[in-house]
Amino acid sequence: MRLAVISSAFPCGTGEPYLAAELAALHEHVSYLAVAPLRPERGVTRDACGATAVVQFPLDLVTLGRAAAAFRRAPRACFTALAEIIMAPRSVVAKIKNVAIFPRALALAERFHAERIDHVHAYWLSTPATAAYVVARVNRIRWSATAHRWDIFENNMIAEKAAASSFVRSISEAGRERLVALAPKSAEKFVLVRLGTALARSARARASRGSVRLLCAAAFVPTKGHDDLVTAFARAHAVEPALHLTLAGTGPLEARIRARVATLPCRSAVAFRGYVEHERLLRELREDYYDAVILASRDDGVREMEGVPSILIEAASLGIACIATRSGSVGELLDADCAFTAPPNQPHLLSRAILDAVDVGERRARADRACERAQRLHDPERNAAQFAGLLAGPVGGTA
């Protein structure tokens, strides 16, 4: 099989770190693998894990030239695809997004035609899936998509995309159930294949130190609940001064959270690191820099909820204790038996979970159980084989 994957930005920029592990495992199951970022932030900045990086920029002359070539090759298919995304009964915002990426989709169709790609897979059900939908229409090939979380709730042509695809992969059971509710006529096409991002557990040199170091690696966006985390940490630190919190990441709420922490008595126990390369964070986890990873994800039952965060999968698989709110699909990986959990949106209960994690024996016991679960549910090789099987054969139809 000659497979092309459409990402959002990987391997350009800093997003989608989980894709490296997934593509590395998937590469063993295909004869040729390409990865094309729909919105490259810049040139290639990361290892594409054996895949050929297909990078094209909006309004670039090469991109426009390829789009024109695709139109000359298959004008009727191009017109049909454009009409379908314009006429789909979705929001004006979704239509604008889809039309905006249409030239890039045509350019990818031409490049993939030259590369003899026979299946294209989008790693988001939003505009990357729109691009895959167009490519499949123009090139008459099979296509599929992976749905995560926010892209499900955005509902950008989900029913239409599901009907035209070979399958739509969900990375969580909760996500699959939501997809079925949105497009019941295509229920058989929604399949669960979890992220294959578990890491091989290595022998950790258990640090002997007086502090308890917590790491939150998350973008500063509302869903990640940094306000709740800071509140919970301040309460816990007042009881246990040995606690220390490191915040890694950037985002629109970072300045506000920094300003708030600056007013707290525990401010010297909170460190802001900004953007940290994914590989560096994993190396620090392996080398026992942190005693636990923490996420305070919020949940409003509609859009503001969590999927199964890669950082929790990675930390658990390495044998690092996890502290997390039971937001969205987090419970599919972690529960009170193998992690320190609390209801979302309740910082006072999250502070209790933090204090429970101070106990070294309990922390290590739960981390061991979480490790076993993460290795079982998110094994890269096994999940890649399952994924490759879906890519190789029809589930419920073709484009």
Image (cartoon, rainbow, N blue to C red):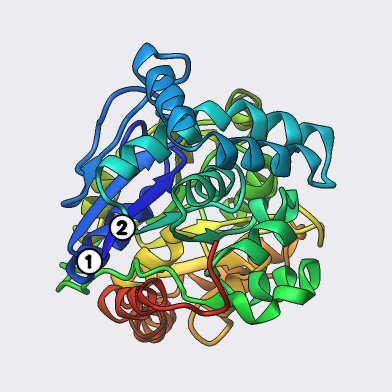
Q: Earlier in the sequence, mark 2 or mark 1?
A: 2
| Residue 239 point in image, percent of width and height | 60, 58
Task: Find numbered disc 1 in the image and state the secondary structure of the residue it sits on.
Answer: loop
Q: Which residue is under mark 1?
A: 30
Task: Find numbered disc 2 in the image and state the secondary structure of the residue it sits on.
Answer: strand
Which amino acid lies under the numbered mark 2 shown in the image of this protein? Answer: Leu
When asked about the image quadrant of residue 291, the answer is bottom left
> In the rendered view, would you say 72 is above or below 76?
above
Residue 26 in view here: yes
> In the rendered view, would you say 244 is above or below 58?
below
For the residues labelled 2 and 1, say whether their Cβ atoms are less than 8 Å apart: yes
Question: Viewer-proximal residue, 399 or 330?
Answer: 399
Which amino acid lies under the numbered mark 1 shown in the image of this protein? Answer: Val
In the picture, the disc for residue 154 is none
| Residue 372 point in image, percent of width and height | 35, 86
In the picture, the disc for residue 3 is 2
When asked about the image quadrant of residue 66, the answer is top left
Question: Viewer-proximal residue, 348 or 185?
Answer: 185
Q: Is residue 227 left or right of residue 302?
A: left
How many numbered discs?
Answer: 2
Badge 1: residue crowd in 10 Å (few <14, some 14–19, many ≥20): few
- Residue occupying image coordinates x 19% and y 58%: 287
- Residue occupying image coordinates x 36% and y 65%: 315
Looking at the rendering, in which quadrant would you find the C terminus?
bottom right
